[in-house]
Image (spheres, rainbow, N blue to C red):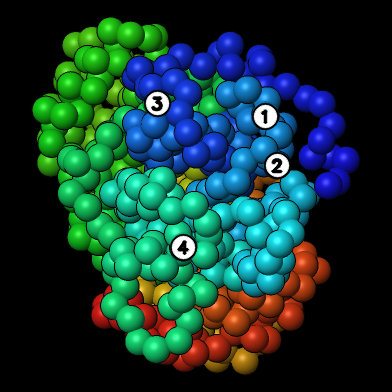
Amino acid sequence: MGSKATEWASWSDYRIDESPTVGLPAGGDLPCALFFPADYSVGMANLGYHYIYRTLREQGVSVERFFASPVSHRSVERDTLVERFQVILGGISYEGDAYVFAKWLEAGGISPSRVERERDVSGKNNNFIVGAGGAVTYINPFLLSGIADFIVLGDGVEATRYVVETMRSEDSRERVLPILAQHPSIYVPSIHKHGTHRLEVSRRDIDLDFGCGNWVTPRTAFGKTLLIELQRGCVRGCGFCTLPACFSPPRQRMLELVKRDIIRVASVCDFNQIGLVTPEAGDYKELDELLNFAENRGIGISFASLRVDGMTAHMVRALVRGGRHSVTVAPESGDDDLRSKCGKNFTNDHIIETLYMAKDEGVRSVKLYFMIGLPGEDDEHIMSISKLCDRVRNITGLRVTATISPFVPKPGTRWANEHFGGGDGANGEKILKSKYAVLSRSFGGSLRGIAQKASVKEACLEYALSWATPAMSEFLATEGMSAFSYRYLMERVDRNETMKEFRRLGLRSNLR
Ligand code: SF4
């Protein structure tokens, strides 16, 4: 095992800062490491991770949390080394997290290759059962098939209970996996690799899940915030977005349950604000009533991002009351027509009008999110980004920062078949670099201080990983980390092959 994994470091300061929102059974059997492939501050702001932890603890499992940093291979609960756990579960939100998961396993002395662990019949590696779940499984579970022994597809609470029951009833991985494979939403690559099957991505009634975070802590990405879920899926249909395509149908939690959670948690611990976990808060039917409820109790609210055509003065006031003086909106393009093709039917004038209103309510700055490499985009469209930034700054007086990322076509989305890079598909990387050059010129030669761009290399990697086939995933896991070379992976993307695999497993008939 690498020295980094065993060197002494403790989570004690983090434990002291955590306030539990719910009483969970202590102790238990089936020692299980639940890993989130990012820093503690990010992982603790992920509600799905909270739900799976709570499910396991309520089932009497002795689960402990692991994060990629600041202490990578010891548990938050008791500083236990990962090698003491035989069941390892990873919550994978983004494509790049698969790489972090594999790297973390390897640094912890566990082979990241499912096939290698299977071959190691009497060795230490064969003792580990590695499972995975999380947002990526709604989009493309094959990415994890070379790493994990089983993959929970979609909403994971019910399937996780099934995993626990199975592991309790069987004592070896050889006996556990065939039983897991009988569950419709558990993909077992070693068993499902041949023939045809009927798997399905689980999408539950969200009122059946828990609805809020298990802890509040000042050490999360949003400060001492109570996470509350409002909706899953999205009623809109933006062509590039995985939310309507992969997380549908749209589901809203009943307001009574949301209020009940807030009242219950407020009676057991302090928090500074409520963080609404929802695609577009403005689409929640009873948002005004929820805002009034929070206001009457003096509680601030934070929204991840706001859609311009759903943003109201009421929402902005709630943000400002919670101490936030910045809003984040995603126009996607500076051009009205291209934005409308994306699925966002609001104009530049509408954006400016809405941000003017936000300024009147106490907002001081705005973050604008754009994409380049969109279908049908030309240089004029790219230059419209800097023009819109200038207009917003000059007319509203708000401080403006812009983040510009390449469009990445993903499985299942309306734009799944569009070219990566937005050109003729011949060389997405090269096209994106030239588009960034146009963008940079339009900002006066440098984006510094105004805009930041996501790297083309990362976008290439995201694109390749989002279309990974089982063979690509096996290759990644067996060849080690150097195989995650984005150029190497880009050359191997074959969307037709990926689609064939989806069909073979009966996954998502809506897929393009
Ligand atoms: S971009 Fe926003 S509004 Fe559009 S589908 Fe995705 S979550 Fe919904």
Q: Which element is circle 1 on?
A: loop
Q: Which residue is mark 2?
A: 83
Q: Which element is circle 2 on?
A: helix
Q: Is residue 220 above or below residue 330?
A: above
Q: Residues within 10 Å of mark 1 (few under 14, many from 20)?
A: some
- Amino acid type, residue under disc 4 in the picture: Arg
Q: Which residue is mark 1?
A: 80
Mark 1 or mark 3: whose residue is earlier in sequence: 1
Q: CA distance from mark 4 to mark 3?
A: 33 Å
Question: Where is residue 288, by image quadrant?
Answer: top left
Which of the two residues, 109 or 434, is positioned nearer the viewer here? Answer: 109
Q: CA distance from mark 2 to mark 1?
A: 9 Å
Q: Residue at 69% of width from left, 71% of height from top?
A: 119
Mark 2 or mark 4: whose residue is earlier in sequence: 2
Q: Is mark 4 within 8 Å of ligand 1?
A: no
Q: Which residue is mark 3?
A: 214
Residue 441, how many percent across, how many down? 69, 65
Left or right of 16? Residue 275 is: left
Q: Residue at 75% of width from left, 46% of height from top?
A: 108
